[in-house]
Amino acid sequence: MAQLAVLGKMLVRRRVLDTSEEETRFARCLSTMDLIALGVGATLGAGVYVLAGEVAREKAGPAIVLSFLIAALSSVLAGLCYAEFGARVPKTGSAYLYSYVTVGEIWAFITGWNLILSYVIGTASVARAWSSTFDNLVEQKISTFFNNSMAIPDTGGVLAQYPDLFALILILLLTGLLAFGVSESALVNKIFTGINLVVLSFVIISGFVKGDTANWNLTLENIKNNRSILVPEGTNFGAGGFAPFGFSGILSGAATCFYAFVGFDCIATTSEEAKNPQRSIPIGIVASLLICFVAYFGVSAALTLMMPYYILDTKSPLPEAFKYVNWDPARYIVAVGSLCALSTSLLGSMFPMPRVIFAMAEDGLLFRFLSRMHKKTKTPVLATIVSGVVAALMAFLFDLDALVDLMSIGTLLAYTLVAVCVLILRYQPGSLSSSADKIVELERLTDKDTITDGDSGDMHGQTLEKMPQKGTFSPRHLLLPNSQSPTKISGLIVYATTAVTCVFFTLLCIVLALWGDSVIEGQAVWVTVVVTLVVLSSICVLVIWRQPQSNEAITFKVPLLPVLPLVSIFVNIYLMMQLDGRTWIRFAVWMVIGFLIYFAYGIRNSSSAEKHSPRNSEPILQGKKPIYLGDDSNAAAIVTLSPESGDFKGGAKQRQA
C-alpha cells in the first residue's frame, strides 16, 4: 500500500509555475497579427478543400453547414478555455503545460501525448490533401502511376491505396524551413494566408452567384431521374432534402468537421515567441476562430448550392464544382489557390508540434535530447526534425479518412482536459501566475501553520484571499460555503465534483450514442436512465456553481462559469462517442505506446522527480497551493513557512527596475 501511495503522489505531482523568470530560449518576435495569421493559416486548409466534399456527400448533405456550426461551437468553447490559460500561463507547452500546473503529471502527459498525435496526423492529412489537389490539376496522372507501380494491398482502410511519395517530400521540405527560423516561417505564413482568404472569398461569392437553392431541396425522385452525371452504383443518397441523413448524420458530420477547426491551439504553443503573450494569445485565438467559422460556413454553403451533394467529388470538391457550373477557368484558379492554402495549413500544423515535444522533453517526460535548441535560429531543431520525419512517414503510408477520425478523438480529449483545468483552477485559492518581480510563494500550509483563518499575511498593503486552514468538511459546504473567497475545502469540493460530473457526462453520452434512437422513441428504460443522469449532472453543476470563485485579475477570463466549460466538456465527450470502434482501438494503441514511454522513462526522469522541494514537485490534493503576492515594482521575495517552527524564512531578491 505504501508503494501505491508513493506511485499515486508521483502521478499527480504538479509543476509550480514561476513567472518571475523572464528569460526564454526562444526568440520573441511574433505580433498579434502573426498569431492570428498562424491560427487562420493552420485551420483553413483540408477542412475546406477536402473534408467538405466527403462529409456533404456521405454524412450530412447540404446540412453540412449545421455540422460546421456544431463543430465550431465545440471549438469556440475550447478556444475560450485556451484563451484564459494563455493569459495565465505565458509559457511554451499549450494544453500540456496547463494540465501540468493544474491537475498533475499523468494528465499532463496524456494531454501532451494526444497533442502530438493531433499535430502529427494534422500534418500528414494536410500533406495528402495537397498531393490529391495537385494530382487533380494534372488529371490524376500521379495517382495512376503510383497505383500501377506501387499499389498497397487492401488493409481495411488502415493503409492508403498507394504510398504518397509527393506528400513525404513536401513535409520534409517544410521541416527544413521551420528549422531555419521563426520569423521567416511567420512571414511566409502571412503571405499565403492572405492568398487563402482571397481565394475563399472568391469561392463564396461565386457559389452564391452560380448556386441553385433547388440543390438544398432535392427529393429521392429528383435524384433517381438525374442522368446528367453517372452516379456510382450503391451510392447512399439518404432521404433527400436539406438534411438527407437526418440529425444523426449532422452530428456524425460534426465529429469529422471538428478536425477542420483544429489549429487555433497552435497559437497557445507560441507563448515564449510572442512579444506580448498575455494579450496576443487570447485575441489571436478568438479572432482566428471567428474568421475560420465564417469561411467554413460560407464555402460549404456555396459548394452544396453549386452542385448536388450526392455527386460531389470527395477528393477535390471545389475545382470539380466549378467545372460543373461551366466556370472552367475558375476551376484552375481555385485549384492553385487551394495549394497555397494547404501549404499554409501544413506549415501551421507543423509549427506547434516540435514545441510541445520540446516542452515535454525539457520536463523529462520525453527523451531529453529532444529539447536541444539551435543557438542561432533559436528553434528546437531535433524535435522539429524527428516530428517531421514521423509525420512524413504517416502521410506516406496511411489513409486520410482513418487519420482524420483518430486526430479528432485525440484533440477532443485534449480540449476536454483544458476545460476541466479552467473549471478547477477558477475555484482554487491562490494564483498560478503574477507579473514578473511580484512573487511570494508560501511553500507549506498545514494545520499547524501560524497563519490563521482570515489572515494569510499582508505585504505592502495587499491581502491574500481568506484561506481557513483549520476548517473541516461538512455536507452543508456543498451548497452553503463558509467563505466568499476560495478555500482549501471549496477547492477540493470543485475538484471532486468536476471528476464526478465528467463520469456522469461520459455515461450519458455513451447512452445517447448507442441507444439514442430508443430514447427518441420514448422507451421507458432508456428515458429513465437519461433523466437520472441529467438530474445527477445538474446537481453536480449546482454544487460547483455555489462555490466561491477566485477574484484574480487576468487579461481574459472564460465568461459564464461554470456553464461554458461544462458545456465544452459535454460537447467534446459527445463528439468522441460519435466516432467508431476502430478509431477507439487505434487510439488505445497510441495510448499504450505513450504509457510505455512514460512509465519506462518519463516517471523517473521527470524534472519534478529530480527536485524534491515542494516548490518543484507538489501533490495536488495536499493543500500546498502556490500563492503569489505582489510587492513593489522593484523587488520580489520568496517566502517559505517552516512547519516545524511555524516561522517564516524568506529572502528578497532585489532587481533593477
Image: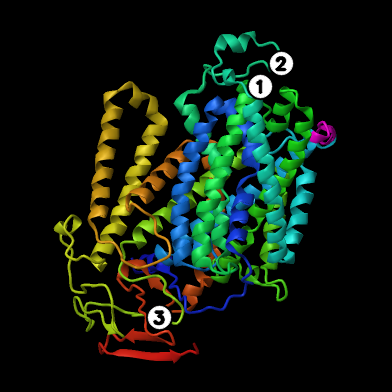
Q: Are marks 2 and 1 in contact (CB under 8 Å)?
A: yes
Per the image, label 3 sits on a secondary structure element best described as loop
> Mark 3 sits on what residue?
439
- Residue 633 is drawn in which quadrant? bottom left
Q: Give residue 137's position: percent from left, percent from top.
A: 80, 35
Look at 49% across and 30% down and name the residue there. Answer: 250
Answer left or right for 140 relative to 421. right
Q: CA distance from mark 2 to mark 3?
A: 70 Å
Q: Read off the residue under disc 2.
A: 229
507 vs 298, nearest the viewer: 298
Q: Earlier in the sequence, mark 2 or mark 1?
A: 2
Q: Is residue 102 above or below residue 536?
A: below
Amino acid type assigned to the residue bearing label 1 in the image: Ile
Give the mark nearer the N terminus: 2 vs 3.
2
Quadrant containing the N terminus is bottom left
Q: Position of residue 194 (x, y in %)?
A: 68, 50
Instruction: Label 1: state its secondary structure.
Output: helix
Q: Which residue is depicted at the point 17% across and 67% down? A: 472
**Rendered residue at 40%/90% (across/down):** 652
Q: Dot 3: few (<14), some (14–19), or many (≥20) neighbours within 10 Å?
A: many
Tag 2–tag 3 contact (CB < 8 Å): no
* Residue 67 vertical placement versus 228 (above, below): below
Say which residue label 1 marks: 311
Q: Quadrant of residue 549?
A: bottom left
* Position of residue 404 measured from the top left corner of the image (x, y, whole percent): 60, 41
| Image: magenta residue range | 137-148
Secondary structure character of the magenta stretch overall:
helix
Residue 164: which numbered mark, if any? none
Give the class, few, some or many, for how many residues have Cα within 10 Å of label 2's Cα (few <14, many ≥20).
few
| Residue 485 highlighted magenta (yes or no) | no
